[in-house]
Amino acid sequence: MTSVSEIAPDLYRLSTYVPEANLQFNQFLLRDEQPLLVHTGMRGLFPSVKEAVARLIDPATLRWIAFSHFEADECGSLREWQTLAPKAGALCSLVGKVVSVDDVVAARPAQALDDGELISTGKYRLRFLRTPHVPHCWEAGLFFEETQGTLLCSDLFHQNGDVEPLTSADVIGRARQTLLDYEHSPLASYMPYTRQTAPTLERLAQLKPRTLATMHGSTFTGNGAQAIRDLAAVLKEILGAE
Ligand SMILES: [Fe+2]
Ligand SMILES: [Fe+2]
């Protein structure tokens, strides 16, 4: 069962809790003239996520499907979505498109976005930021909805558990604990710490987001710049040791 919560105007968080992983998988639907879905979820979640989208719009009218990097929770059901919605175009980085997406999961060639490129959906507009290896993968990028100040932050701020949809309380403690738990599990080395990590996170902080919409865990509302700088300190502490 996928639950639906509005976390910013016309931006809905579709959340499916998977108990075996103690983990939520969240997609975000921007309901606008050109409806846009952020992350598809895995193929196994498709029936449940489709039913959740159908509570908000006719799924066949979906126009855009945006995602950060090439993993099952980001874009695994892209082909299923594009088959259901004949005008739905995939949005990702050039590296994502040419290295994996077009060959493996896309029903139609993806639209590769340049760093800083803007997509308008009607009332809302998304800025694409190329963020290689943040949170992970060469092809990674993130989307920032500029009118409301919402950063769609993929795996950044990942918090385990079946947590509340939206919070203004600190999420850094939970994100830090999740990262530590992963480091001591078969899922260790979840994120790389590279020369690009700190400057990329600082660039995100300078967007001054008011809402941080993460794929796994609660959406945070509040001082997004401070939260990103706090997360940068945690990543340096846990992953960046010399
Ligand atoms: Fe990921
Ligand atoms: Fe993820």
Image (cartoon, rainbow, N blue to C red):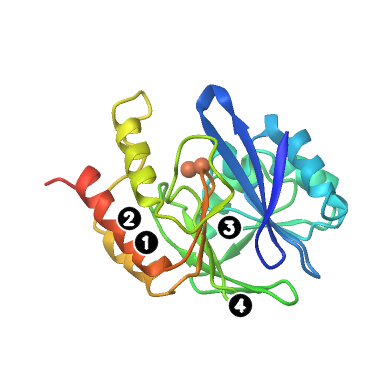
The CA span between labels 2 and 4 is: 24 Å
Q: Are marks 3 and 1 in contact (CB under 8 Å)?
A: no
Question: Which of the marked residues, 3 or 1, is nearer the chain's N terminus?
Answer: 3
Residue type at mark 1 is Ala
Label 4 sits on residue = 147
Tag in front: 3 or 1:
1
Expressed as whole percent of the image width and height from the top left, the position of residue 60 reads: 87, 52
Expressed as whole percent of the image width and height from the top left, the position of residue 175 reads: 38, 45
Element at badge 1?
helix
Residue type at mark 3 is Cys
Question: Which of the marked residues, 1 or 4, is nearer the chain's N terminus?
Answer: 4
Residue type at mark 2 is Leu
Q: Are marks 4 and 3 in contact (CB under 8 Å)?
A: no
Q: Nearer the viewer, residue 33 or 90?
A: 33
The CA span between labels 1 and 4 is: 20 Å
Find residue 80 and report its image quarter.
top right
Q: Are marks 2 and 4 in contact (CB under 8 Å)?
A: no
Q: Are marks 2 and 1 in contact (CB under 8 Å)?
A: yes
For image coordinates 55% across by 36% down, the residue present is: 162
Q: Nearer the viewer, residue 90 or 39?
A: 39
For image coordinates 81% across by 40% down, the residue present is: 51
Label 2 sits on residue = 231
Q: Are marks 3 and 2 in contact (CB under 8 Å)?
A: no
For image coordinates 20% across by 48% down, the residue present is: 237
Expressed as whole percent of the image width and height from the top left, the position of residue 229 reads: 31, 63
* Residue 224 seen in the current view: yes
The CA span between labels 3 and 2 is: 24 Å
Label 3 sits on residue = 92
